Image: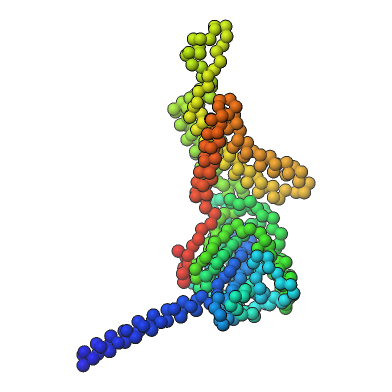
Amino acid sequence: MKLLTITSMKKSFIIFVLTFLVLIPQVYAQQNTYWHTSDRYGVELDGEGDAFVVAVLTFEGLQQGVSLNTVNLEIPGTRISVYKAIQVPYSYYGGYYPSQQQNADFITYTLTPLSDSTLITLNLKTPIQPNQQTTVVLIYQTQDIATRSLQGLDFQFQTIKDPNAIIRDVGANVYVPKNMELKGSAKFDIQYKPSGFAAQTAGATALTTTDVSRYISPYYNRPTQYSAQNLDPNESFTVTGTYGDNAVLLYTYEILGTIIVLVVLAWVFRRFGLVSRIRMTFKPKTTTQQRAQAPRAVAPSPKIEFSWMRVIISGGGSGFLYVIAALLTQFIFSLLQNIGYQFQLLAIVLVIVLFIVPLMALFLPAIYLAKNYSWKEGILTFIIAIVTAIALLYLVSLIYPIFRLTYGYGGAIY
């Protein structure tokens, strides 16, 4: 009797394992009936740390004979207000527009609060069909995505996650109020207003594709500031950054770091007498033989000797000045975005000057050494300047990253 019981348990276990192995491919297949070909986000931040978001989501069916009428998505955050959900039966991706007018339908949705996110179920008017694309424009507001700090407002925006599909491509543009600056990025001239579009269509019962395309096409026509590819189900793309209305406070740590580095360098130069050594390096030298052979009444012509110290100092300094000039140029150029029409001529002159200054920092030291010492020193100085500039720019990008990927499973972000 005991042996029979053990045998039955083994059979049950084997049946359970076989059933589990058979169900795994079916579950996996159900999760790959569609994907997102391209998602675009326009994120308008305000001065209180909230964000008005326009999400343009493009779906495409992957399995023949399988269509979907509902889509479940997860919006990070619990304080979510959805204003509109609009569907058009084709994709805007790549600048494609239909030859005839079609209606863009308002679709219904339901919201379900989760622990740290909000589940939204979209009831599509046009189902997701195999090898066909459909676009959903989701307009919503998310609160408290930014917190105040010494520099300004530190924000963290997460894109929408889909638990049942991969996202092939996602991009986001971040906009701040006109009186504020986005750290590390020049201001964009906003040609369209998502909030204005929401207000204009508040009482509408139907929209044409022309109405929608006039509004969302700039998301595809303009390169995205932040992007990622091939996000797995339940993965999100997170954009982090800082913005504020005081440029000095916005770059407080960078300014303090630069001052500390300059003070340390000044101490090192003074402690080891490097200033006098460098000054002597850039003076032409005469050899003992030249001084002995030259007549007393005639000054001997100097013989220029090759100097690695002169080349390294000139090349390194040139690369450093180029990076500083380029960063200052980008910063000042961002300030010129809001200049009035009456100062356009001055702005054009400043832009030309700002583009010339970094080039002068890169080329002039090499030209100076080639003319006054030797062409070898000039070429080596230019090469060292290029290498130094690339290394410094790479270092800056590592120290001050502007975006990162985060992976979330089951509503939790790791």
Q: Position of residue 166 (x, y in %)?
A: 52, 70
Q: Residue furthest left?
A: 2
Q: Residue at x 58, y 25 (%)?
A: 372
Residue at position x 23%, y 91% from top?
4
Please, which residue is most extreme toward the bottom here? Answer: 1
Residue 253: x percent and y percent?
A: 52, 46
Residue at screen point 63% across, 63% down:
42
Q: Quadrant of the C terminus?
A: bottom left
* Residue 148 visible: no
Viewer can see residue 312:
yes
User: Is 218 located above or below residue 301 in the figure?
Assistant: below
In which quarter of the view is residue 136 placed? bottom right
Q: Nearer the viewer, residue 146 or 101?
A: 101
Question: Which x, y percent locates residue 53?
Answer: 62, 65
- Asked where in the image residue 361 lies, by quadrant, the reply is top right
Is 413 placed above or below 326 here? Answer: below
- The residue nearer to you, when weighing 162 against 119, is 162
Residue at 74 percent of width and 72 percent of height: 99
Q: Quick check: 12 left or right of 134?
A: left
Question: Which x, y percent locates residue 246?
Answer: 62, 49
